[in-house]
Structure formats: C-alpha cells, structure tokens
Amino acid sequence: MLISNIGELVTNAPPDEGTVAGPGPFRALTDAAIVLDGGYVAWTGPASAAPAADVAVDAAGRAVLPGFVDSHAHLVFAGERGAEFAARMAGRPYQAGGIGATVAATRAASDGQLRANLARLTAELLRQGTTTFECKSGYGLTVADEARSVALAAAVTPEVTYLGAHVVPPEFSGDTARYVDLVCGEMLAACAPEARWVDVFCERGAFGPDEARTVLRAGQAAGLQARIHANQLGHGPGVQIAVELAAASADHCTFLSDADVGALGSAAGTVATLLPGVEFSTRSPYPDARRLLAAGATVAIATDCNPGSCFTSSMALCIALAVREMRMTTAEAVWAATAGGARALRRADVGHLGIGARADLIMLDAPSHAYLAYRPGVPLIAGVWRSGDRVL
C-alpha cells in the first residue's frame, strides 16, 4: 500500500535507515509518501520518488504520524466516580483512598460486565489514534479478582501490568505487611503468567519505599519487568527506587527534587512518564517537562485513563496539555506520545515509522502534527492503520 501526497510525515527515525531500528529523535518529512507491506513499513521518502504499489491512498495533504503509544492506563474496572470529580472541582483535594470505591464496584461486577467496559474503552482509544496501549490490573486486590483482571487485559493487549500493590484493601486495613506478602506470593503466582510488567503505587496512603522494593523485586524474580507510580502526591522515594531497580518507567513525576531529575537524566533505561491529564483532573501542579528534558531524561506522555484521577483516553488532549502546561514543544510532545511511550514499554517496533517498524499509523485531518495542540478538543483522526490494515 502506498500512501502519498502526505503534507507532513512524522517518522521519528533517521531518513537514511534501511533496517529495523528503535525510535530516534523527532523527524518529519514534507510532501512525503510511505509504503506499507506485510504489516510493516517498507519505504518512506519524497512523494515524487514513491515506488509503485498495489493499492494507493491519497492523503490529500494531510499529516501522517506513528500511532500513539499509551504506556499507562487502568482499563479493567467497573463503576464510575463522577461525583468525586465534581467534589474535587469544588475544592476537595485528591487522595489515593478514592480507589477503594472502584475496587468495591469491580469486585461486584461480572466478567461480562468488565469485558464490555474494557471493549468500550479500547475502541475509544483506537478511534483517537492509540494503536498500542498498556493496561493495568489493580481494582480487584484479591487473588481471584486480580487474576481475572490480568486475563481480561491480556485478551486486548500484550502490555499487561500486574498492579496488586495499588492500595491496601479494607480487609487488610492495619496489616499492610500481610497484604504485601499476598501480593508477592499467591497473587503474583496467579497473575504473572498473563502479565509482562509489575507495578506499585509508591505514595503516602498506599505503599512505602521498603514495601515498593519488595513488590518490584518479587515481580522481577517472577520474570516481570518493573514500572512504578512515583512522586505523584508529593516528594518521595519512588523515582530513586525506579532508577535503583532499573524500572522501565517512573510514572507521574509531579514532585521532583534535583536529585530525582538528575537520576532520571542519567538513567538511560528509565523513562519519565508524564500524565498531564491527571493534573488537569485533580487540579494538581503540572510536572516541569523542560527541567527533565534539559537534564537529558527520556520523557513519555500517557493518559493514565482511569475512573478516578483521570477519566480520559485522549492522547491528543494530553499532548495539548503537555504543550500548554508543561512547556513542551509540539514536536517534543508528539515524540513523547509515540516514541517516548514505546521506550517506556521497551518496544522498538512501534512509536516510529522507520523501515521495518510495525505499520501502525494515523492520518490527521490537518496538515501537520502541531494541530494536535493547535486545535485542542477537535476530533482530528481521519484514518488509523494497525499492522498495515486500515481499521478506521
């Protein structure tokens, strides 16, 4: 398939590469074309030099980008928390304890109800240009409920995260140590076969540094890779633990010391994943992306789609917020939402459109990537391809 007459083709890859490569710096071609073959990118270059193909698509001057890579989402749940959001907007501060309401609703829901809500949200992601996404458990917090959450997530994405250590459930109130033993023992054994990642909410009201290390090390010993909710509600140890344990990402990064920024800048393998929709939805301060970028940190943007602190599945909204509120350029924000997310998931096949990349791409009803921030709230997705097949 040849897609030609592209106004701007964002590749995030060196223009002269001829083999599969991981995501590189933001790069874009104008008046461009791309060839998809067998589910992969076979060629990119000037439209005037495009080779012949079996099927031709005229982009009519529109922009084409890699599909968004959402590396942080909580999609297996039941119930809703709209009243809690309204209360926050009226002045009540956000606290981690609200998760308990979703835990109760999720435990009470049938598999069919959870599956239907998950299908609705994954379809919503796709309509908005997200072609790769991570999905966490964490709203069951019993062995059986976490196991079914992980299994449901595994049916829709390979990027499944076991988050048994989301909060301490009410039946373990006052006995966090016993719950951590469960998370690292029977619950982990039930969930690890269907998961790729292990996560922990390292925050006041959730789990402390020693508990976070224990959970992540147990997950790593079971063959899972680590990621961590870090430094969302205040200054804390989460970022340092992420770097110490070579976690793929430290997520939130709202409150960072100079030492935290320096650690993320020097840790090539740990991505700082920023979740601007959370700050929007909780009226919290936004992370300073410029500070991280200046230190050399790799930055990703993700939605943190969940029913409590951020109920949006729109990567475009998160890009616009990153540009406006976190002082990122439009190119930096789009890179963070594509290649940055891929790095946070340690994926070299998505997030870019270099030769050999998986043919996951989106077409905007706009001439350039900048319109994602320039026209916030406007549905700009004109086409979506996954593995070379047009799905929207």
Image (cartoon, helix red, strand yellow):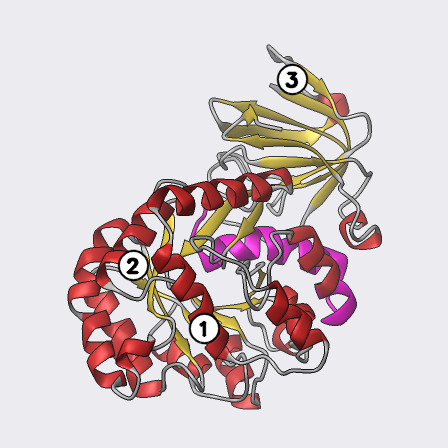
Q: Give the Cα distance between marks 1 and 3.
A: 46 Å
Residue 326 part of the magenta segment: yes
Which span is picked out in magenta? 322-348
Residue at image coords 58%, 30%: 385
Q: Nearer the viewer, residue 336 or 295?
A: 336
Disc 2: CA contacts within 10 A as few (<14), some (14-19) or many (>=20): many
Check disc 3 and give the amino acid type.
Answer: Pro
Q: Nearer the viewer, residue 209 or 329?
A: 209
Check disc 2 and give the amino acid type.
Answer: Glu
Task: Using residue 121 as the reference point, say whether residue 8 is left or right of it.
Answer: right
Quick one: which residue is furthest to the top in this view?
54
Say whether residue 353 is visible.
no
Check disc 1 and give the amino acid type.
Answer: His
Q: Which residue is mark 3?
A: 51
Q: Nearer the viewer, residue 274 or 334?
A: 274
Seen in the picture, residue 155 relative to 271 is either above or below; the reply is above
Residue at image coords 64%, 52%: 315
Residue 146 numbered mark, or none: 2
- Point out the tag, 1 or 2, that comes first from the N-terminus: 2
Q: Give the Cα distance between marks 1 and 2.
A: 18 Å
Place residue 1 in its image quadrant: top right
Say whether residue 36 is visible.
yes
**What percent of the width, then of the height, locates residue 246?**
36, 71
Q: Which residue is mark 1?
A: 229
Q: Give the Cα distance between marks 3 and 2.
A: 50 Å
Q: Secondary structure at mark 1?
A: strand
Residue 75 part of the magenta segment: no
**What percent of the width, then of the height, locates residue 170?**
33, 77
**What percent of the width, then of the height, locates residue 9?**
71, 38
Quadrant of the rendering where the C terminus is positioned: top right
Residue at image coords 24%, 70%: 183
- Point out the tag, 1 or 3, that comes first from the N-terminus: 3
